[in-house]
Structures are given as C-alpha cells and as structure tokens.
Amino acid sequence: MLENLNELVRENVQDAVVNNSEIPNEQNEAVIQAASGSIFDSLKNQLSSGNIGGLADIFNSGNAEGTEVAQQAAGSFTDKLSGLGINAETAKKIGASIIPVILGKLTQKTADPNDSSFNIKDILGSLGGADGKLDMNDVIGMFNGGQNQAGSGQASGGGILDKIKGMFN
C-alpha cells in the first residue's frame, strides 16, 4: 500500500512540490515520502485509536478536508518538512494544499471498482493489528480494551457493527 500511496502523492504534487522554488529539487523525493508517510501514519493512528467511524466517514464521503485524519497528517507532514530544513510557513501551506487532496484521491480510488491500485481491505490490513494483519479480533479489541468477552468475539456494549458497516460497502 505504501508504494501505491507514494505513487499517488508523486502524481499530485507537481506544482506544490516539484515546481516549488522553496523546495530544493534534491529534496523532492524526501517530501513525497514525508507526505505519504504522514498520511499512512495518520490513518494507522485513527485505526489503532478505534476511530473506525471517522475512517468510514472519509472513505464513504471521499472528502477528507477538515477531518481529524487530514489535520493530523498535515501536522505530521509540516513537522517532517521542518526537519528537512524547509521553512515552517511553506511546509504548512504545502501540507494544507496537498494532504486533503491526496486523501480524497485515495478514497476515490478505493471506491472505484475499475481501479485496483487501492482496496479498502488491503489498506486496513496494512494499517492492521500487532501482527500486521487486521482481523475482527483486532477491530473488536479497539472497542473493549483488547479483550473479547469470554473469547466469544463479541464486544461488550455492542455497536461495533454500526461503526464499521460503512467501510465494507
């Protein structure tokens, strides 16, 4: 998934990064890696913190602008660019302009049955549990502190299906 995400970023940052005089050409690839890494880390963070509903909203609506994922990814991206010596204000502008666009394109590609570059199950798997794979026990564990009720696979308090049902449409 990360390789495809890098390519998606590369396809969408020509003006903001490659043609930007404030980004040295020798840092273009590092900026692309920073953008895709920030998006990946933010999606993973949302999943691991149990924000399945927030992820479902993004993937179902195709609009990431103003979402917690986009804000978190843009903040992480800005920090990474500052670490590369890029002016903080420039980094902030670039993050605000490209991160929501790339997240939106990611969700559109995921929803497009004619585009196999991204698949929601593969994305969730790559963001997955401790073993690198996401299964229902991982998802259930997000809602009940990692414990299944008596090994039944049932989350206490219910409601998990309501939170994830939109992700697999």
Image (cartoon, rainbow, N blue to C red):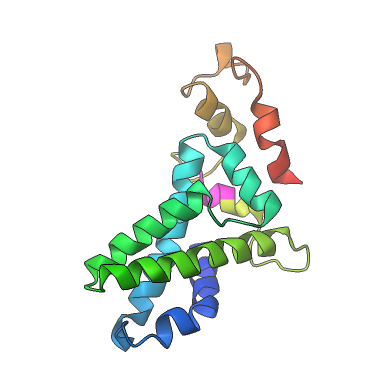
Residue 112 position in % (x across, y down): 75, 63
Q: Residue at x 70, y 66 (%)?
A: 116
- Say above or below: 28 vs 101: below
Q: Position of residue 89 (x, y in %)?
A: 30, 69
The answer to whether residue 129 of the structure is visible from this angle is no
Query: Which residue does the image show at 49% across and 50% down from the upper left?
Result: 69
In which quarter of the view is residue 16 placed?
bottom left
Where residue 138 sits: x, y (%)?
53, 33
- Per the image, is 125 magenta? yes
> In terms of depth relative to the viewer, which is nearer, 127 or 43?
43
Question: Which SS type dominates the magenta stretch?
Answer: helix
> Is 54 located above or below residue 80 in the figure?
above
Q: Is residue 57 above or below residue 103?
A: above
Residue situated in front as seen by the camera: 113 or 42: 42
- How many labels sit on residues? 0
Give the residue at x 25% y 67%. 82
Q: Quadrant of residue 139?
A: top right
Q: Is residue 103 visible?
A: yes
Query: Which stretch appears magenta?
Result: 124-129
Relative horizontal placement of residue 120, taking residue 34 as reference (left or right)? right
Residue 11 at what x, y percent from top left?
A: 54, 79
Left or right: residue 134 compared with residue 85: right
Residue 108 quadrant = bottom right
Q: Is residue 49 left or right of residue 152?
A: left
